[in-house]
Image (cartoon, grey):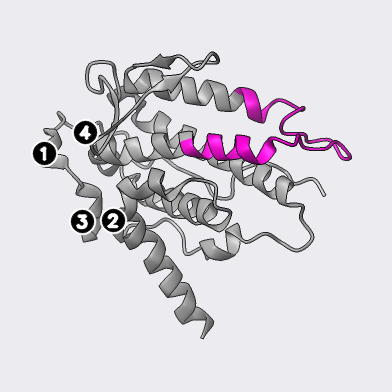
Amino acid sequence: MRLKRNGSYTLHRKSKTKPNGKKTAAEEKKLYLEPEYTKARITDFNFKELVTLPREIDLNEWLASNTTTFFNHINLQYSTISEFCTGETCQTMTVCNTQYYWYDERGKKIKCTAPQYVDFVMTSVQKSVTDEDIFPTKYGKDFPNSFESLVKKICKYLFHVLTHIYWSHFKESVALDLHGHLNALYTHFMLFIREFNLVDPKETVIMDDLTEILCNSTEAQNHIKER
Protein backbone atom coordinates (compact mmCIF):
# COMPACT_ATOMS: atom_id res chain seq x y z
CA MET A 1 0.00 0.00 0.00
CA ARG A 2 1.45 3.36 -1.05
CA LEU A 3 0.97 6.27 1.34
CA LYS A 4 0.52 9.87 0.29
CA ARG A 5 3.69 11.53 1.49
CA ASN A 6 2.73 14.87 2.92
CA GLY A 7 2.59 16.63 6.29
CA SER A 8 0.39 15.76 9.26
CA TYR A 9 0.06 19.25 10.71
CA THR A 10 0.51 22.79 9.43
CA LEU A 11 2.97 25.47 10.48
CA HIS A 12 1.63 29.00 10.35
CA ARG A 13 3.80 32.04 10.83
CA LYS A 14 1.75 34.02 13.35
CA SER A 15 3.96 37.08 13.62
CA LYS A 16 5.87 39.19 11.13
CA THR A 17 7.72 41.04 13.89
CA LYS A 18 11.44 40.56 13.60
CA PRO A 19 13.31 39.82 16.81
CA ASN A 20 15.82 42.32 18.11
CA GLY A 21 19.57 41.74 18.24
CA LYS A 22 20.90 38.34 19.26
CA LYS A 23 21.97 37.76 22.84
CA THR A 24 25.26 36.12 23.61
CA ALA A 25 25.40 32.33 23.67
CA ALA A 26 25.61 32.37 27.47
CA GLU A 27 22.49 34.55 27.78
CA GLU A 28 20.35 32.39 25.55
CA LYS A 29 21.87 29.06 26.58
CA LYS A 30 19.11 26.49 26.91
CA LEU A 31 16.33 29.05 26.92
CA TYR A 32 14.29 26.23 25.37
CA LEU A 33 14.26 24.39 28.74
CA GLU A 34 12.37 27.16 30.54
CA PRO A 35 8.93 25.84 31.67
CA GLU A 36 7.06 28.73 30.05
CA TYR A 37 8.43 27.56 26.68
CA THR A 38 8.40 23.78 27.07
CA LYS A 39 4.66 23.94 27.78
CA ALA A 40 3.99 25.53 24.39
CA ARG A 41 2.22 23.17 21.97
CA ILE A 42 0.14 23.63 18.82
CA THR A 43 -1.72 20.35 19.06
CA ASP A 44 -2.99 17.64 21.40
CA PHE A 45 -2.03 14.84 18.99
CA ASN A 46 -1.12 11.52 20.56
CA PHE A 47 2.30 11.40 18.91
CA LYS A 48 2.94 7.88 20.19
CA GLU A 49 -0.02 6.67 18.15
CA LEU A 50 1.11 8.71 15.13
CA VAL A 51 4.50 6.99 14.95
CA THR A 52 3.30 3.42 15.56
CA LEU A 53 3.41 1.24 12.43
CA PRO A 54 -0.16 0.41 11.29
CA ARG A 55 -0.74 -3.32 10.75
CA GLU A 56 -1.61 -3.00 7.08
CA ILE A 57 1.38 -0.79 6.15
CA ASP A 58 4.78 -2.04 4.98
CA LEU A 59 7.62 -0.88 7.26
CA ASN A 60 9.66 0.69 4.47
CA GLU A 61 6.61 2.53 3.17
CA TRP A 62 5.97 3.87 6.68
CA LEU A 63 9.59 4.98 7.05
CA ALA A 64 9.48 6.64 3.63
CA SER A 65 6.25 8.51 4.31
CA ASN A 66 7.34 9.79 7.71
CA THR A 67 10.88 10.65 6.66
CA THR A 68 9.56 12.74 3.77
CA THR A 69 7.12 14.49 6.09
CA PHE A 70 9.82 15.31 8.62
CA PHE A 71 12.11 16.60 5.89
CA ASN A 72 9.39 18.98 4.68
CA HIS A 73 8.51 20.23 8.17
CA ILE A 74 12.08 20.69 9.36
CA ASN A 75 12.95 22.47 6.13
CA LEU A 76 9.95 24.75 6.65
CA GLN A 77 10.81 25.35 10.30
CA TYR A 78 14.37 26.29 9.41
CA SER A 79 13.17 28.62 6.66
CA THR A 80 11.34 30.74 9.26
CA ILE A 81 14.63 31.64 10.98
CA SER A 82 17.02 31.29 8.04
CA GLU A 83 17.50 35.05 7.69
CA PHE A 84 19.08 35.01 11.17
CA CYS A 85 21.31 32.02 10.43
CA THR A 86 24.15 33.49 8.41
CA GLY A 87 27.82 32.90 7.86
CA GLU A 88 28.50 35.73 10.31
CA THR A 89 26.11 34.72 13.11
CA CYS A 90 26.69 30.96 12.79
CA GLN A 91 30.24 30.48 11.58
CA THR A 92 30.16 26.77 12.44
CA MET A 93 27.39 24.15 12.58
CA THR A 94 27.29 23.82 16.33
CA VAL A 95 24.92 22.32 18.88
CA CYS A 96 25.97 22.57 22.51
CA ASN A 97 29.71 21.76 22.50
CA THR A 98 29.46 19.61 19.38
CA GLN A 99 30.55 20.86 15.96
CA TYR A 100 29.28 19.08 12.88
CA TYR A 101 31.17 18.72 9.62
CA TRP A 102 29.84 17.77 6.22
CA TYR A 103 31.33 14.86 4.29
CA ASP A 104 31.19 14.98 0.52
CA GLU A 105 30.58 12.00 -1.78
CA ARG A 106 34.25 11.05 -1.58
CA GLY A 107 34.18 11.14 2.20
CA LYS A 108 36.17 14.35 2.43
CA LYS A 109 35.53 16.27 5.65
CA ILE A 110 34.29 19.82 5.04
CA LYS A 111 34.21 22.55 7.67
CA CYS A 112 31.36 24.89 6.86
CA THR A 113 29.09 27.53 8.32
CA ALA A 114 25.69 26.50 9.67
CA PRO A 115 23.72 27.78 6.66
CA GLN A 116 26.10 25.96 4.32
CA TYR A 117 25.70 22.75 6.32
CA VAL A 118 21.91 23.03 6.29
CA ASP A 119 21.99 23.66 2.54
CA PHE A 120 24.10 20.52 2.05
CA VAL A 121 21.64 18.52 4.17
CA MET A 122 18.48 19.77 2.50
CA THR A 123 19.90 19.43 -1.01
CA SER A 124 21.06 15.88 -0.32
CA VAL A 125 17.80 14.79 1.32
CA GLN A 126 15.69 16.43 -1.39
CA LYS A 127 17.64 14.50 -4.00
CA SER A 128 17.02 11.21 -2.16
CA VAL A 129 13.31 11.58 -1.35
CA THR A 130 12.48 12.54 -4.94
CA ASP A 131 14.48 9.66 -6.45
CA GLU A 132 12.07 6.91 -7.54
CA ASP A 133 14.84 4.32 -7.21
CA ILE A 134 15.29 5.18 -3.52
CA PHE A 135 11.86 6.43 -2.38
CA PRO A 136 9.50 4.69 -4.84
CA THR A 137 5.95 6.01 -5.04
CA LYS A 138 4.61 3.70 -7.75
CA TYR A 139 2.79 0.54 -6.73
CA GLY A 140 4.84 -2.63 -7.11
CA LYS A 141 8.23 -0.95 -7.13
CA ASP A 142 10.54 -2.24 -4.39
CA PHE A 143 12.64 -0.25 -1.97
CA PRO A 144 16.42 -0.75 -2.25
CA ASN A 145 18.16 -3.09 0.20
CA SER A 146 20.04 -0.13 1.63
CA PHE A 147 16.86 1.84 2.32
CA GLU A 148 16.85 1.60 6.13
CA SER A 149 20.49 2.66 6.42
CA LEU A 150 19.77 5.65 4.17
CA VAL A 151 16.78 6.64 6.30
CA LYS A 152 19.00 6.49 9.38
CA LYS A 153 21.52 8.78 7.70
CA ILE A 154 18.79 11.24 6.71
CA CYS A 155 17.30 11.28 10.21
CA LYS A 156 20.72 11.94 11.74
CA TYR A 157 21.20 14.97 9.50
CA LEU A 158 17.67 16.24 10.14
CA PHE A 159 18.33 15.93 13.87
CA HIS A 160 21.36 18.17 13.47
CA VAL A 161 19.29 20.85 11.73
CA LEU A 162 16.42 20.66 14.21
CA THR A 163 18.70 20.91 17.23
CA HIS A 164 20.68 23.78 15.72
CA ILE A 165 17.43 25.74 15.62
CA TYR A 166 16.97 25.12 19.35
CA TRP A 167 20.55 25.87 20.28
CA SER A 168 21.23 28.93 18.14
CA HIS A 169 17.83 30.30 17.09
CA PHE A 170 15.30 29.50 19.78
CA LYS A 171 15.07 33.16 20.77
CA GLU A 172 14.04 34.01 17.22
CA SER A 173 11.48 31.18 17.21
CA VAL A 174 9.95 32.60 20.40
CA ALA A 175 9.92 36.14 18.99
CA LEU A 176 8.07 34.82 15.92
CA ASP A 177 5.70 32.81 18.15
CA LEU A 178 6.77 29.56 16.47
CA HIS A 179 8.21 27.70 19.46
CA GLY A 180 4.97 25.75 19.92
CA HIS A 181 5.33 24.40 16.38
CA LEU A 182 9.00 23.64 17.02
CA ASN A 183 8.20 21.70 20.21
CA ALA A 184 5.49 19.67 18.48
CA LEU A 185 7.81 18.86 15.59
CA TYR A 186 10.67 17.88 17.90
CA THR A 187 8.42 15.64 20.01
CA HIS A 188 6.98 13.89 16.96
CA PHE A 189 10.40 13.42 15.36
CA MET A 190 12.11 12.11 18.50
CA LEU A 191 9.34 9.60 19.24
CA PHE A 192 9.56 8.41 15.63
CA ILE A 193 13.32 7.82 15.65
CA ARG A 194 13.02 6.14 19.05
CA GLU A 195 10.26 3.84 17.83
CA PHE A 196 12.38 2.50 14.96
CA ASN A 197 15.89 2.99 16.41
CA LEU A 198 16.87 5.29 13.57
CA VAL A 199 19.46 7.46 15.31
CA ASP A 200 22.16 6.26 17.71
CA PRO A 201 21.42 7.49 21.27
CA LYS A 202 25.04 8.68 21.43
CA GLU A 203 24.11 11.13 18.67
CA THR A 204 21.03 12.50 20.45
CA VAL A 205 22.42 12.60 23.99
CA ILE A 206 23.26 16.30 23.64
CA MET A 207 19.52 17.06 23.69
CA ASP A 208 18.45 14.50 26.30
CA ASP A 209 17.36 17.23 28.70
CA LEU A 210 14.83 18.60 26.21
CA THR A 211 13.78 15.14 25.06
CA GLU A 212 13.13 14.14 28.67
CA ILE A 213 10.81 17.10 29.16
CA LEU A 214 8.92 17.02 25.86
CA CYS A 215 8.73 13.33 25.01
CA ASN A 216 8.43 11.74 28.42
CA SER A 217 5.79 14.23 29.54
CA THR A 218 3.85 13.47 26.35
CA GLU A 219 4.06 9.72 26.99
CA ALA A 220 2.92 10.24 30.59
CA GLN A 221 -0.09 12.29 29.46
CA ASN A 222 -1.02 9.62 26.94
CA HIS A 223 -0.81 6.96 29.64
CA ILE A 224 -3.17 8.95 31.86
CA LYS A 225 -5.66 9.33 28.99
CA GLU A 226 -5.61 5.59 28.30
CA ARG A 227 -6.41 4.58 31.88
Horizontally, residue 90 falls left or right of residue 204, namely left
The answer to whether 200 is drawn above or below residue 157 in the figure is below
Pointers 2 and 4 in contact (CB under 8 A)? Answer: no
Labels 1 and 3: the sequence-earlier one = 1
Tag 2 residue: 209
Going by the numbered disc 3, the residue's amino acid type is: Glu
Q: Name the residue under label 4.
A: 19
Q: What residue type is labelled 4?
A: Pro
Structural crowding at the residue carrying mark 2, measured as other residues with C-alpha within 10 Å and reported as few (<14), some (14–19) or many (≥20): few
- CB atoms at circles 2 and 3 under 8 Å apart? no
Tag 2 near tag 1, CB within 8 Å: no
Mark 4 Cα shell of 10 Å, populated few (<14), some (14-19), many (≥20) = few
- Looking at marks 1 and 4 on the same chain, the residue that comes earlier in the sequence is marked by 4
**Which of the labelled discs sits on residue 34, or is there none?**
3
| In magenta stretch: residue 31 | no
Q: How far apart are marks 1 and 3 (CA)?
A: 15 Å
Question: Mark 2 or 3 closer to N-term?
Answer: 3
Amino acid bearing label 1: Ala
Work out how far the residue at label 1 is from the one at label 4, CA to CA, in angstroms: 18 Å
Q: What element carries label 4?
A: loop
Per the model, the C-alpha gap separating discs 4 and 3 is 19 Å
Q: What stretch is highlighted in magenta?
A: 127-156
Which residue lies under the disc numbered 1?
A: 26
69 lies above or below 36 = above
Horizontal placement of 47 versus 220: left or right? right
The crowd level at tag 3 (other Cα within 10 Å; few <14, some 14-19, many 20+) is few
